[in-house]
Image (tube, grey):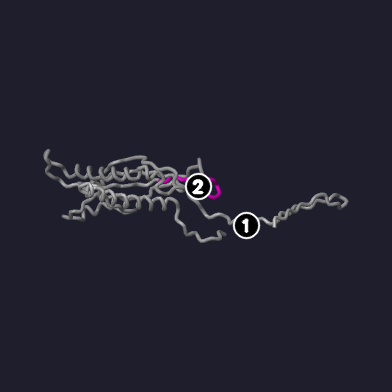
């Protein structure tokens, strides 16, 4: 029986929580820096969500709301064991993949060059959010995502673009940029508690006449 209560998070859960923490903290910092530089802070605003189902629906429910800032939904996708590292007893190395889904919503508008369609505006917004998210997580400050000892590698594996669907039709004016983010980290499990070795006893061997040939006893007390 395992002698301890299992009450710790798995490595991938810790990594997911750290990704969310990094993004929310750094985006707030970027908005403050933009304000200090007399820039529009809304151009650095990305709302962060975790494991949300269809978060883009808030764009559809906003109506005339002025807050149509892009959003990023952080989702765990899968983990694969990395047999090149770790061991069979206390620690395994895993490659975990996360989806960083960046959604942008656009409204048709008149520009100096003519007309900007809503779908194109949505694509620009999603692209802007994905650019900011990627730049933050791949910055030099976050080589180990602030989890040195747990995380040994992180990278953006793939970037794809699509249109969210409602039934068989794409939703107008909303675009999705998906960053597939891969993190190499450790996973551990409860181990057998170590005890202090006190004695080792050997087997007594006797000859045919009853003579003791060998016996072993080591006392480590």
Task: Tell me if residue 160 is in the magenta stretch.
Answer: no
In the orientation shown, which residue stands out farthest toward the top? 113
Residue 165 shows in the view: no
**Left/right of residue 6 with respect to residue 160 in the rendered view:** right
Q: In x, y percent, where is residue 79?
A: 43, 46
Q: CA distance from mark 1 to mark 2?
A: 24 Å
Which part of the image, by quadrant, shows the N terminus? bottom right
Task: Examine the rendered structure and indicate whether residue 202 appears above or below residue 127.
Answer: below
Give me the disc on residue 167. Answer: none
Which residue is label 1 attached to? 195
Q: Can you tell which quarter of the image residue 135 is in?
A: top left
In the orientation shown, which residue stands out farthest toward the right? 209
Which residue is label 2 attached to? 92
Q: Specify the segment rendered in magenta.
A: 86-96
Q: In x, y percent, where is residue 184?
A: 44, 44
Question: Tag 2's secondary structure?
Answer: strand
Q: Which is more toward the observer, 166 or 143?
A: 143
Q: How many marks?
A: 2
Task: Tell me if residue 95 is in the magenta stretch.
Answer: yes
Q: Residue at x 37, y 45 (%)?
A: 141
Q: Which is more toward the observer, 11 or 118?
A: 11
| Upstream in sequence: badge 1 or badge 2 | 2
The secondary structure making up most of the magenta span is strand
Asked if the residues shown at circle 1 and circle 2 are in contact, with their CB atoms under 8 angstroms apart, the answer is no
Which part of the image, by quadrant, shows the C terminus? bottom right
Question: Tag 1's secondary structure?
Answer: loop
Q: Residue at x 32, y 52 (%)?
A: 25
């Amino acid at each position: 029986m395992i002698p301890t209560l299992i009450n710790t998070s798995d490595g991938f859960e810790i990594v997911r929580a750290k990704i969310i923490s990094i993004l929310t903290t750094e985006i707030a910092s970027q908005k403050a820096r933009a304000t200090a530089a007399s820039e529009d802070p809304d151009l650095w605003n990305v709302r962060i969500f975790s494991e949300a189902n269809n978060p883009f629906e808030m764009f559809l429910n906003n109506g005339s709301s002025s807050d149509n800032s892009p959003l990023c939904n952080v989702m765990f996708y899968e983990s694969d064991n990395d047999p090149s590292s770790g061991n069979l007893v206390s620690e395994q190395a895993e490659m975990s993949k996360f989806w960083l889904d960046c959604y942008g919503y656009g409204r048709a508008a008149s520009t100096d060059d003519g007309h900007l369609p809503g779908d194109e505006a949505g694509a620009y917004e999603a692209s802007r959010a994905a650019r900011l998210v990627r730049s933050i997580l791949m910055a030099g400050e976050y080589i180990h995502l602030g989890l040195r000892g747990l995380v040994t590698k992180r990278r953006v594996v793939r970037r794809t673009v699509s249109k969210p669907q409602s039934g068989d039709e794409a939703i107008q004016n909303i675009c999705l940029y998906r960053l597939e983010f891969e993190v190499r980290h450790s996973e551990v499990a409860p181990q057998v508690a170590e005890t202090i070795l006190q004695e080792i006893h050997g087997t007594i061997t006797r000859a045919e006449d009853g003579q003791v040939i060998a016996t072993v006893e080591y006392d480590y007390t």
